[in-house]
Image: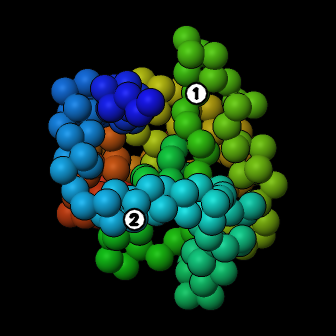
Amino acid sequence: MFNSAGSVERLINQLARLPGIGRKTAARLAFHILKSTREEAFELAETIREVKEKVGFCSVCFNISEEDPCRICTDPKRDRNTICIVEDASDAAAFDKVEGFNVLYHVLGGRLSPLDGIGPDDLKIRELLGRLDDNVKEIIIATNPNVEGEATATYISRLLKPMGIRVTRIARGLPVGSDLEYADSVTLSKSLEGRQDI
């Protein structure tokens, strides 16, 4: 027999697993889904299924994409001399909204965090080194301005310095402890303008 309370509870538990969603917000979302039409709810479920089936990671930059390589890596209008290193795909999306900033990206898939057991081998650092050729003149390190992001930036800059590539770090126009994906385009643009060699 159908147990609605059990199904609703399972939905709330699943929604609460999403980042930034607490139990109360998960409950509000669950009840919103219950109030929506059957078609709207099924469309949401179908969209989630479709994203999981169609979206993967670019084999070059590790950004999310439906194509491989992604549209950014294959865009001939991109500045092939500059690679911007970010922690996550959401950070690349935020920078890509900055007008006039048409560089290539490299998504690390996280940041160094020894306390969480995340070391250099857990990130896409080896793959970054494999991408470097004579065309690359500058690496912009755009990790988040927190302790782990700074440690990641320092580690990568020490690897790249001996290669003779200009290594820059985005300026401190971003508040310490914040996440790049929530920053507006103006703040990101200013942080890019004020980047410095490290």
Considering depth in this image, is 82 or 90 the residue closer to the camera?
Answer: 90
Residue at screen point 63% across, 23% down: 118
Q: Earlier in the sequence, mark 1 or mark 2?
A: 2
Say what amino acid the circle numbered 1 marks: Leu
Q: Position of residue 102 (x, y in %)?
A: 47, 76
Query: What residue sits right under mark 1 in the picture?
Result: 112
Per the image, label 1 sits on a secondary structure element best described as loop
**Position above or below: 126 against 56:** above
Can you name the residue that lies furthest to the front here? 1
Say what amino acid the circle numbered 2 marks: Glu
**Position above or below: 43 against 18:** below
Q: Residue 192 is drawn in which quadrant?
A: bottom left
Query: What residue sits right under mark 2 in the picture?
Result: 43
Q: Which mark is residue 58?
A: none
Categorize mark 2 by other alpha carbons within 10 Å: few (<14), some (14-19), many (20+): few
Q: Position of residue 39 (x, y in %)?
A: 33, 66
Residue at screen point 72% across, 63% down: 60
Q: Position of residue 168 (x, y in %)?
A: 50, 51
**Position above or below: 108 against 195:** above
Asked if one can make out residue 122 in the rendered structure from this viewpoint, the answer is yes
Q: Is residue 147 left or right of residue 163?
A: left
Residue at screen point 55% across, 21% down: 113
Q: Is residue 158 left or right of residue 185?
A: right
Per the image, label 2 sits on a secondary structure element best described as helix
Asked if one can make out residue 187 in the rendered structure from this viewpoint, the answer is no
Q: Position of residue 71 (x, y in %)?
A: 59, 78
Q: Is residue 76 left or right of residue 8?
A: right
